[in-house]
Image (spheres, rainbow, N blue to C red):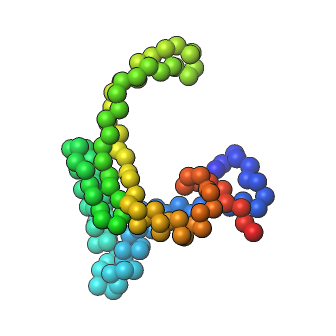
Amino acid sequence: MAGRKEEPGLTRVKRTTKADLVEQVADAIGPRGTKRACALVVDALLEAVKDALARGDRIELRGFGTFAVRHRKAHPGRNPRTGEPVVVPPRRVPVFKPSKLLRSRVDRATGASGTEGPTAAVREP
């Protein structure tokens, strides 16, 4: 991150972008598909997920996980600048619950290093 000092010996976890996913799909399909066609497939999949969640549908992808919409109730909060009490309105938020298979695969890949989140720093040996 700009303006943040990195501790020596720490590296950032790689981020995978939509372009990276398109590249992986194109590699999996091979010479039969163009990157443009793969980009359309990735975009269509993501759009279908967004549309389903907007309708309040639950999306179950076996071996990957479940996307759902959770309803949050209104609750009291505080304005962080003034400290004034405010009511946080009810809202719907998307949530993702990984499958046991995905959790175990990630755990094996990371070696259960105890990192905390997608941008956690990892100490190099």
Farthest bottom residue? 31
**Residue drawn 54% across the image and 55% down it:** 118
**Is there any visible trace of residue 86 in the rendered image?**
yes
Question: In the depicted view, which residue is nearer to us: 64 or 41?
Answer: 64
Q: Quadrant of residue 42?
A: bottom left
Left or right of 22 in this view: 2:
right
For residue 102, above or below residue 84: below
Measured along the vertical axis of the image, is residue 67 above or below residue 39?
Answer: above
Asked whether residue 51 appears in the rendered view, the answer is: no
| Nearer to me, 35 or 69 | 69
Residue occupying image coordinates x 30% and y 43%? 69
Q: Residue 28 in the image: state x and y as whole percent.
A: 36, 80
Residue most extreme to the right: 8
The residue located at (36%, 64%) in the rendering is: 64
Judged left or right of residue 92, residue 117 is right
The residue nearer to you, when weighing 11 against 3, is 11
- Residue 104 is situated, as x and y percent measured from the top left of the image, at 47, 66
